[in-house]
Image (tube, rainbow, N blue to C red):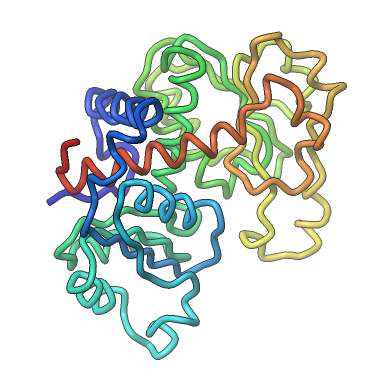
Amino acid sequence: MRHLMSPLDFTTEELDMLFDLANDIEWNPVKYAHVCDGRILATCFYEPSTRTRLSFESAMTRLGGRVIGFSDAASSSASKGESVSDTIRVISCYADICAMRHPKEGAPMVAAEKSLIPVINAGDGGHQHPTQTLTDLLTIRSMKGALGGFTIGLCGDLKFGRTVHSLINALVRYSDIRFVFISPEELRVPDYITEMLKAKDIPYEEVIRLEDVMPQLDLLYMTRVQKERFFNEEDYVRLKDFYILNMDKMALAKPEMLVLHPLPRVNEISVEVDSDPRAAYFRQAKYGVYVRMALILTLLEIEA
């Protein structure tokens, strides 16, 4: 039995197979419409989520399976003090696979150690968000043709953004990638990441102004400043509108550059950018369903 706790749980060769499967699902949906008949996915979400939870539910439903679970810790026995370990033991009796989101780092790993079914980390605090990273990688590979040979700018909250941390750690396994970190001083990428890039001799630079680096980017990964990760309301208010991507900034970019965003968006991308063909974030959300469908099949060892 296998779990997914980190994007690094899969080798690059295994990721290629997963993405090939996701692309086949994209182009041949009827072929996969009933492969999970009789199977049940449990979505155990201890903190709010719209896209990730519904994406998992859509994925299982499109495969012919069913979904049970909860969308808030208050509606589960966690509100009575039940531990994650006990919850997953019970869930293992009811479902065939579980997707878990939890505000505490490492909680899905604790669940996986006690689980009798595959567990997917659907986000644990500011730590990891592996299925979002798989979505990002599939989007890049599908729209750019390869994973490697590009300059990617990551903009916004690079300190608390788990999607950013996971994506960087996944991309360093591919060749000829250059990182540009765009953030205010207070939200710079953690030192352990820049130290890792130095150790691997992977080029990167840190800047404050987005306009200064737009012309050199092949990919721009925008993120929101996350209110829920701040301890100080004043700091959040001061930094939340630090970057707003609009058409004036897009005019500085390459014609083939892609804009990605894990969503939800607040106001860091102006709605006028949505009509630009380089805006890929809603297509990215669609790829999230395909990659989660492929992941469910892989972990359940089901072949179409």
Return the residue nearer the eye: 186 or 113.
Answer: 113
Q: Residue at x 81, y 36 (%)?
A: 270
Q: Position of residue 102 (x, y in %)?
A: 43, 65
Up the image or down, 199 lies above or below 193; here it is above
Q: Position of residue 98 (x, y in %)?
A: 29, 60
Return the residue nearer the eye: 263 or 236.
Answer: 263
Up the image or down, 6 lies above or below 99; here it is above
User: How many marks do you count on the picture?
Assistant: 0
Q: Residue at x 50, y 73 (%)?
A: 72
Q: Position of residue 91 (x, y in %)?
A: 25, 72
Up the image or down, 153 lies above or below 62; here it is above
The answer to whether one can see residue 190 in this image is yes
Q: Residue at x 47, y 81 (%)?
A: 75
Up the image or down, 146 lies above or below 291; here it is above
Horizontally, residue 201 falls left or right of residue 34, namely right
Q: Position of residue 45 (x, y in %)?
A: 44, 66
Horizontally, residue 8 falls left or right of residue 279, namely left
The answer to whether one can see residue 107 in this image is no
Q: Residue at x 32, y 65 (%)?
A: 42
Question: Which of the 4 quarters of the picture holds residue 212?
Answer: top right
Q: Residue furthest bottom?
A: 80
